Structure formats: C-alpha cells, structure tokens
Amino acid sequence: MPENPHDSEFRSFVALSARLGAEPLLVQAAGGNTSAKRDGALWIKASGKMLRDALATDIFVPVDLEGVRSGIAREEADPTAGRVLGVTPLRPSIETTLHALLPHRIVLHLHSVNALAWEVRSDGEARVAERLSGLPWVWIPYHRPGLPLTRAVRAPAAAGAAVLALANHGIVVGAADVAAGEALVRDVERRLAAVPRTAPGPDTAKLDAVARIGDFRIVADPIVHALATDPDCLAHARAGVLYPDHVVFLGGEACVVDSADTVPAAIAAYGARNRATPAALLVRGAGVLVARQAPGAATEMLRCQAEVLLRVPPATSLRVLTAAEVGELLDWDAEKFRQRLAC
Ligand SMILES: [Zn+2]
C-alpha cells in the first residue's frame, strides 16, 4: 500500500484532520472528510475511516487527480474507479470528486453542527449570508452526496468560492495550505456559532420501563435525551430528517412512543412503513433509547441531531429532506452507500 508522504506539510495536514475529527460539533463518526493535493495526487480520506484516527492509523488514500477530474468532465459513472494510486485496501470517500473538482491544495469538508443549525432552516441561505458576508462563500442547494453534489459545485468552484455552505449537509472549506484552511474553518465557525438551549434531563425510571419491552438501552450521552425532553426538538425530529448521514444511520423517520404499553404497536407501525426496526426510540418527555445492537455511529448521529435542534429556535420553519430525497439515500444500494458515505 502507498505510504503517506513524510514531509512536515503532510504531517500537519494529518494532524489537522485528527484535530477536526475529534470535535463532535464538526465531525460525527466516519462523516466529514479532508484532502491534500500534491505531486499530481489527491490524498483523500478513505470511506468508513474516521478523521479522529488520522494520527493513529493510515486513513488517506491517493488517487490520480487529473484522472478523476477528466472522469468528472466525461460524466463517467464513477470517476474514481481504477484511479487509486498503488495497491491498497482503502477505498476513496464518496466525496472524492468534490475534493478533486476544487482547485485548493487543502480541502476540509465538515458536518458542522453550527452550520447545520442554519442550513436546515427554510430561510437558511439568507441567515448564512448575513453571517458569512465578506468571505468568498456560496450557498449550494441540497444534492445527494457524490456526483450530484459535485456537479452542483462545479460552477461556484470555477468562480473562486473558498467556502461552500451545503444546504442540509455541512460546509466545505478550501485553502492554499493547512494553516489557512484551519483559520478559515475557525472563522466560519465563529460567524455561524449558535447558542444551544438547555433541555430537561431524562426520566430514567420511565426509560427503564420502556427499555424492558424491546431490545433497547438508555443512551449514555446526556445531550441526546433533549430529542425527547425538549418539546421543540421532539416536534422537529417528528417532522422529518434533515441531512444525509442521519438517514443512513438512523433511517428516514423518528419512532416516537409515549409509554411502555405503546411500544409494540409503535414498532410494528414503524416496521410496516420502513421495512426495518427503529434504531432509536424517542420516549416523549422522558428521553432516548437506542437499539442494543446499534453501532456507536448511531449514537453519534443522535447527538448531532440533538445539538442541531437545540440550536434551532422554537417554531422555526425547517426544510426537511423530501420523501424522494430520503428514498434516494435509502434505495441507492443502502449498504454500499452506508459504507461509502461514511464520507
Ligand atoms: Zn458530507
């Protein structure tokens, strides 16, 4: 497998990736990705790998930059196919084409909670515009991660945008070097910072009673319970899903129950609509349970949802993903997508 470059520039890129990946307000589980362009190669985070592990293990895979770019220009179905440099078991992130298209040497794509808190609003573009004024930024309407999003970014990238605010998704920042990239991320974060509400704590006795009915356990992370104890968070969670990773790890709708005796009917109804068992139960007024077998990523996604919704004022109109957009995420070879989006 190809070795990571050993120079100080690449080491500082890897260190920045690990630093950003360790911040739950910027990256959750294997979401988000970073890249560095050098010597004709695009070093991109591998799918399924976590940025926070960047210093502990090899998470970057090199691809032929000009080859991927030509594949995008020729509208190939998968411009990264056959363009990994060297022999490696790592597969490039589903967002590789987006990174390749941008001209910057360093590209940082983050599922920023603060950005999402604005980007999921119906008036998101105007609210973000107020805060990013003066920066070379652009609003990108929602597109499915992968080639559809890449195509939407082509014109703004050519026009010199260095900050992309992705509706219902996150941010992309491009810079000439690592220090400038981190400085721009911090500036964007400072401008978009939103203050979260404090939610009531969980009712563990009630949660215990519900957990006994199904194969669920109480979520350990206290912030997650806001999804069910804060009435506005719960209302928004019931209304729909807001960004792709949530759909991939937690499905297209929330399963809400009022008490232990309503659990079997709620799970059966959820199963009839979704052909799946719910990964989590939101117990109204009490807190959140997660399926015993759910991966750690599911809890990180619940935490992200709570962090975002606690930053959305009550009664704010949100743009939830449409049924077609959710279906596109779930039907697009769901397992393959889950492994690759892990982006
Ligand atoms: Zn993403």
Image (spheres, helix red, strand yellow):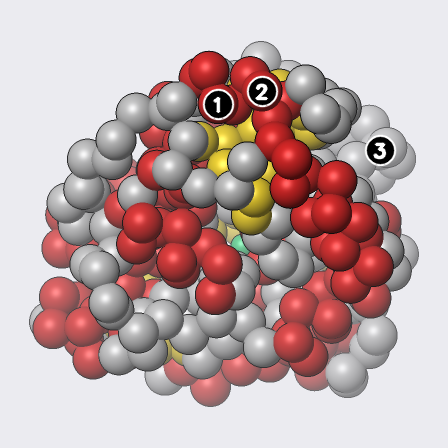
Cβ of disc 2 within 8 Å of ligand 1?
A: no
The residue at which mark 1 appears reads as: 206
| Displayed quadrant of residue 303 | top left
In whole angstroms, how far apart are the C-alphas of marks 1 and 3?
Answer: 49 Å
Depth order, front residue of 154/145: 145
Question: Which quarter of the image is occupied by the N terminus?
Answer: top right
Q: Residue 197, how many percent across, how many down?
A: 18, 42
From the viewer's perspective, tell me whether residue 327 is left or right of residue 57: right
SS for tag 1? helix
Which amino acid is tagged 3? Thr
SS for tag 2? helix
Q: How many marks?
A: 3
Q: Is residue 159 above or below residue 92?
A: below
Which amino acid is tagged 1? Lys
SS for tag 3? loop
Q: Is residue 252 above or below residue 4?
A: below
Q: Is residue 199 above or below residue 104?
A: above
Which amino acid is tagged 2? Ala
The residue at which mark 2 appears reads as: 209
Tell me which image quadrant ligand 1 sits in.
bottom right
Q: Residue 78, how many percent across, how many down?
A: 82, 67
Q: Are marks 2 and 1 in contact (CB under 8 Å)?
A: yes
From the viewer's perspective, tell me whether residue 6 is left or right of residue 287: right
Question: Which residue is found at the position 56% from the left and 44% from the top?
Answer: 257
Depth order, front residue of 179/93: 93
Q: Which of the two marks, 2 or 3, is nearer to us in this view? A: 2
Q: Residue 188, how many percent across, how many down?
A: 21, 54
Which numbered disc covers residue 88? 3
Question: Which residue is found at the position 31% from the left and 49% from the top?
Answer: 231
